[in-house]
Image (cartoon, rainbow, N blue to C red):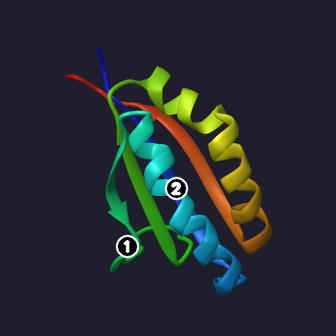
Amino acid sequence: MPKGYWIAQIDVTDPAAYEGYRKLTPDIIAAHGGRFIVRGGAQEAVEGAARPRTVVVEFPSYEAARACYVSPGYQAAAAIRQGAAASNFLLVEGWEG
């Protein structure tokens, strides 16, 4: 079964509020078997445009990634993020190729 991923590109507009989101998400993600692969850090857009912050989270399956995203706990955290940042947020199924 392929893994599932969250891929988010974020432009933080309210750093103080966003910090609340950052503190909530690790436990929620871990409860669904997820782990951070990328959480901020240096990046360079070599083609096209990117938001200043990129986050990639790996889950055991696409279903686990989706279940985490729609969970009440994450949706409460997402409301904080949505008020503190502009973002693109994708759920992606991995490839076992």
Mark 2 residue crowding within 10 angstroms, few (<14) / some (14–19) / many (20+) = some
The residue under label 2 is: 25
> Who is closer to the viewer here, 24 or 12?
24
First of labels 1, 2 by sequence position: 2
The Cα–Cα distance between marks 1 and 2, rounded to whole angstroms, is 29 Å
Judging from the image, what secondary structure is the residue with disc 1 in? loop
Discs 1, 2 touching: Cβ within 8 Å: no
Q: Quadrant of the C terminus?
A: top left
SS at mark 2 in the image: helix
For the image, the number of numbered tags is 2
Q: For the point 56% across and 27% down, which residue is it?
A: 67
Q: Is residue 86 above or below residue 74?
A: below
At x 59%, y 68%, the residue is: 10
Identify residue for label 1.
46
From the viewer's side, name the closer residue of 94 and 58. Answer: 58
Q: Nearer the viewer, mark 1 or mark 2?
A: 2
Instruction: Give x and y (percent) for residue 16.
Output: 66, 85
Amino acid type of disc 1?
Val
Q: Quadrant of the N terminus?
A: top left
Q: Is residue 18 left or right of residue 48?
A: right
Horizontally, is 94 left or right of 26 in the view? left
